[in-house]
């Protein structure tokens, strides 16, 4: 999962490896326990595990740990007992990072903010300089709101498209979170906004200059972009298209029709 341009997947070979492992006899404990991380990445090949999940060997337990229940195969969901666990708060994630990874308070809080309550995402972000996300976002949005054509093309081609797929995803998540902080300020819920001084100054100014309709349209755009980056959209085409849409939203207050929600689906792979 942590390879820069690789997407998570549980293929048929891995499914057969699981089946083989569980066919072995347990010697050190009474029960055999399989923890399957992110079962939503089981595609149709995951049917190889269905029989095993439906009729597991004696004293065998399956724990499926998922982030997106609606993306799990229905044939698997129907055979499980659902236990929902809420995401951790930013303070809890920051505390974990400071205690277990010896991070300073400022860096721990930044990573916790981006991770959205996910320890896995927070650990993944440890090797990144999240300050770069803020600087890059500021420059990108500045080119968008001023409709700086040549500069916009340059930042898309020379920087955004070359981040690597996983870094592109974390950058979009960071930008999404910043826009959501802007929404909180516009809704007079500033007490829920906990950001370092630089980021706080940005969201305060941004919330004063743009309408809620513009912010919400941008959030939908970033969510769609993240979705399609996960599915191997061509990053040059995607970021340039997103940039042009942001120009329309922020500079000219022109909004894409909701019926056109599949416009990114034709991006090259």
Image (tube, grey):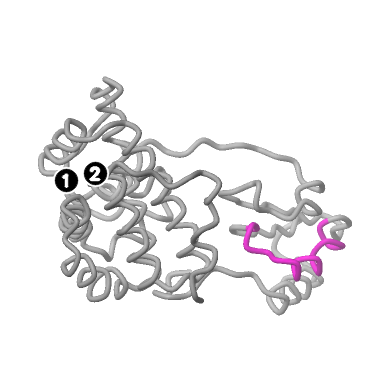
Image coordinates for residue 76, horizontal then vertical, percent: 77, 53
Residues under labels 1 and 2: Cα distance?
A: 5 Å
Q: Mark on residue 106? A: 1
Q: Is residue 115 above or below residue 153?
A: above
* Numbered marks: total: 2
Instruction: Name the side, left or right, on which 27 lies relative to 177.
Output: right
Instruction: Name the side, left or right, on which 58 lies relative to 229.
Output: right
Q: Is residue 27 above or below residue 158?
A: above
Q: Is residue 242 above or below residue 253?
A: below
Task: State yes or no: residue 161 in magenta.
Answer: no
Q: Which residues are magenta?
A: 39-53
Q: Residues within 10 Å of mark 2 (few under 14, many from 20)?
A: many
Image coordinates for residue 11, horizontal then vertical, percent: 67, 74
- Kindly state the secondary structure of the residue where label 2 is placed: helix
- Kindly state the secondary structure of the residue where label 1 is placed: helix
- Between 41 and 24, the residue placed more toward the observer is 41
- Between 252 and 71, the residue placed more toward the observer is 252
The answer to which quarter of the image holds residue 137 is bottom left
Q: Mark on residue 109? A: 2
Are the residues flagged by discs 1 and 2 in contact, CB closer than 8 Å?
yes
Magenta-colored segment: predominant secondary structure: helix
The answer to which quarter of the image holds residue 202 is top left
Image coordinates for residue 114, horizontal then vertical, percent: 32, 49
Residue at left offset 32%, top offset 38%: 214
Residue at left offset 81%, top offset 46%: 78
- Between 110 and 150, the residue placed more toward the observer is 150
Image coordinates for residue 88, horizontal then vertical, percent: 42, 38
Residue at left offset 20%, top offset 50%: 145
Residue at left offset 32%, top offset 31%: 212
Task: State yes or no: residue 46 in magenta.
Answer: yes
């Amino acid at each position: 999962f942590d390879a820069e341009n690789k997407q998570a997947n549980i293929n048929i070979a891995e499914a057969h490896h699981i089946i083989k492992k569980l066919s072995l006899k347990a010697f050190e404990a009474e029960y055999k326990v399989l923890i399957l991380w992110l079962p939503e990445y089981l595609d149709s090949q995951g049917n190889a595990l269905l029989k095993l999940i439906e009729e597991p060997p004696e004293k065998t337990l399956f724990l499926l740990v998922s982030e997106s229940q609606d993306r799990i195969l229905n044939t698997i969901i129907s055979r499980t007992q659902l236990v929902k666990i809420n995401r951790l708060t930013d303070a809890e994630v920051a505390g974990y990072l400071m205690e277990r990874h010896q991070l300073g308070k400022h860096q721990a809080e930044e990573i916790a903010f981006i991770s959205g309550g996910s320890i896995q995402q927070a650990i993944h972000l440890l090797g990144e300089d999240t300050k770069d996300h803020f600087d890059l976002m500021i420059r990108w949005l500045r080119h968008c709101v001023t409709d700086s054509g040549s500069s916009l093309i340059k930042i898309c081609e020379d920087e955004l498209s070359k981040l690597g797929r996983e870094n592109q995803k974390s950058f979009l998540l960071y930008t999404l979170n910043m826009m959501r902080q802007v929404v909180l300020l516009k809704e007079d819920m500033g007490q829920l906004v906990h950001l370092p001084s630089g980021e706080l100054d940005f969201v305060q100014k941004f919330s004063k200059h743009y309408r809620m309709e513009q912010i919400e349209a941008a959030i939908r755009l970033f969510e769609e972009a993240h979705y399609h980056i996960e599915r191997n959209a061509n990053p040059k085409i995607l970021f340039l298209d997103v940039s042009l849409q942001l120009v329309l939203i922020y500079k000219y207050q022109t909004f894409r029709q909701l019926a056109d929600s599949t416009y990114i689906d034709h991006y090259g792979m």
